[in-house]
Image (spheres, rainbow, N blue to C red):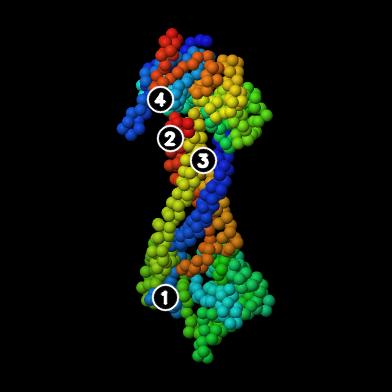
Amino acid sequence: MGQPIVRVSHVHKFFTRGSEQIDVLNDLSLSVQEGEYLGLMGPSGSGKTTLLNLIAGLDKPSQGEIRVAETLVSAMSESELTRWRTRNVGFVFQFYHLLPVLTAYENIELPLLLLSLSSAERKRQVNTALELVGLTDRMRHRPGQLSGGQQQRVGIARAIVTDPTLIVADEPTGDLDKKSAEEILNLIDELHRTLKKTIIMVTHDQRAAQRTQRLVHLDKGQLAEADLAMAASH
Amino acid sequence: MKSFLLLIFKNLRRNRLRSILTGLAVFVLVVIFSMIHSVLTFLDKATQEKSSNILLVISERYRLPSRFDRSHFERIAYEGGSVNKELRTIPGYQPDQYTLWHIIVFSLDPEMKDKDLQFFAIATLPEKLPTMVDGLEGLDPRLCALMRNPPGDAKPNTGILMGPDRLKKIGKQVGDKFPAKTFSHREGKSGLRLPFDVEFVVVGELPAGSRWAQGAFMVYDYLDSRLNEEKCELDGKVNLGWLRVNDKATAGQVAALIEKKVAEVKCEQASSAVSRFLEGYEDLFTIVKWVLRPAILSVMAIIVANAIGITVRERMTEMAVLKVLGFSPRQIQLLVLGEGLIVGLVAAFASAGATYLLINFVLGGINLPVAFFPVFFVPGEVLLIGPILGVGTALAGGYLPAWLARRVNVSEVFAKVA
């Protein structure tokens, strides 16, 4: 493992509901090393998904800084973040969120449409991603014709097809049965091993958590004490 | 671009019923709009004052329908006439460009009941048809000659030119010789005021798809001789006279002179005459122009807005996913707008094309007797206006839903989903 690729520094995040301010993250600091496979756990409402969204550039902190590969993500405008995300972040959703009108191939190809690639290059990258997730024989199927596990594999392929700096996964096994969940976790392990990708995964699943290299617990918007000590040592 | 369009088409196919119904609504509304536009455009053109090569119409000053002695017209238009001598001194007056009209209705039905066997004809000077009647500029002069001297054993001046739609209705074709009875004019000999007989030979057709497709022109001299023989009270009368001048200034001078010298008639630009005749319809046209047409456009936009709005609400999560993947708000907006645009464009184009072909070439025009115009045709510009309207209303209707789609808050959407 190398230098920290993700640096979260004294981040606060609150939401406003009417006149009430709801604090989700409180002065949170965290680093993730390059190539690390990090798990985020915590009870509901602890801020895990919010932290993930901030790191992935889907939202901005109310205070504090977030850097990803030295890019100050927290200071970017929405349009800058949109462009940055395409190349730098691969997102794996709990409910897959594939476009139902597109085939597996077309769903995986979607992020590549935003890059300046020829159709031949796009085809090559999509086929590579399909091979990595083992779904080449299903490329012409629509999501409705795939099982939950297969849909999640398409989701993973879509996340890696642009060769992003960072992969974030929000409960990737949350909607799967035990067997499919195991397959997905194996796949993520494989990707981590072969592609050396930095992966941050939010999970409630203990089996998934055990696969990670480091586990961080959040509670009421802050890191748990043990994790604080570990974060300080990083 | 190709992939974007593919995504738009696939999304349209997702809910085919909604897309088809939206397109159908746009189709029907464009048909209605096109028909209204056709009538209003035609009337606008007819009432628009020209600036050169102007037609002047002479009509009775104090009565409608206009009917005045032919002798007045002869003084004005014929060489040697007392007014004509003065008119020839006005630069811009075209001395050879004149004609007269006497309008009459005939029937082929011996019992005079079947409306389909009736036709109205304008008795006129056949040689002047190509130069004095709008819409007949390309008429073959040989047809005019045939009206005076029809082939075979037909009597002189019994030739008639008729529009193809009217010929079809009465079951006749070029070359047919047929008798007819006068429907509007009655004999005065017997005191019973009976219709009297005439006979015609169809020597040619008036242009199809024109305002004359349902009309007919006959030789004035033949009508005049029959009216005289039957001692009809309309003998020696004409309904309208026509002159042509070069420009508006000449038109003013000619009209002033005629009205000064011949108290029984008035003279004005043809467009003004039509305008005056349409005054009674003014309120109706105003409502159609400024209320009905905008209402149709608004309804089209609302229908598209409704369809796109439902689509966006159903697919908020998808919009959020697209944003996560890196689609910019503008691209998401365009994807949504694109769906409305395609439905609007395709439906409006199909509608405009179908309206144009069906009304002009199948139905023979919009049957709406207004003023002297029994039928209206759809102008070619509708083929362009229809699609523009479709695109415009789709943009107007789709803008707000598309704007909402681009503003989708990713973290809020996924929080709700979770």
Q: State the residue at coordinates (52%, 84%).
A: B186
Q: Please, which residue is most extreme toward the top here?
A: A233
Q: Chain of mark 2?
A: B
Q: Amino acid at mark 4?
A: Lys
Residue shown at 55%/57% (left/top)? B355
Q: Are marks 2 and 4 in contact (CB under 8 Å)?
A: no
What kind of element bears circle 4? loop
Proximity of marks 1 and 2: CB atoms separated by less than 8 Å? no
The chain carrying label 4 is A
Q: Is residue B332 left or right of residue B205?
A: left
Is residue B376 at least partly visible in the picture? yes
- Disc 2 designates what residue? B407
Q: Is the residue B215 above or below the residue A148 in the image?
A: below
Asked whether the residues under the numbered discs 3 and 4 touch, taking CB atoms below 8 Å apart as contact, a structural biologist would say: no
Which residue is label 3 attached to? Answer: B338
Give the quadrant of residue B278: bottom left
Q: Which badge, 2 or 3, is on the more N-terminal residue?
A: 3
Mark 1 or mark 2: whose residue is earlier in sequence: 1
Q: Which residue is mark 1?
A: B64
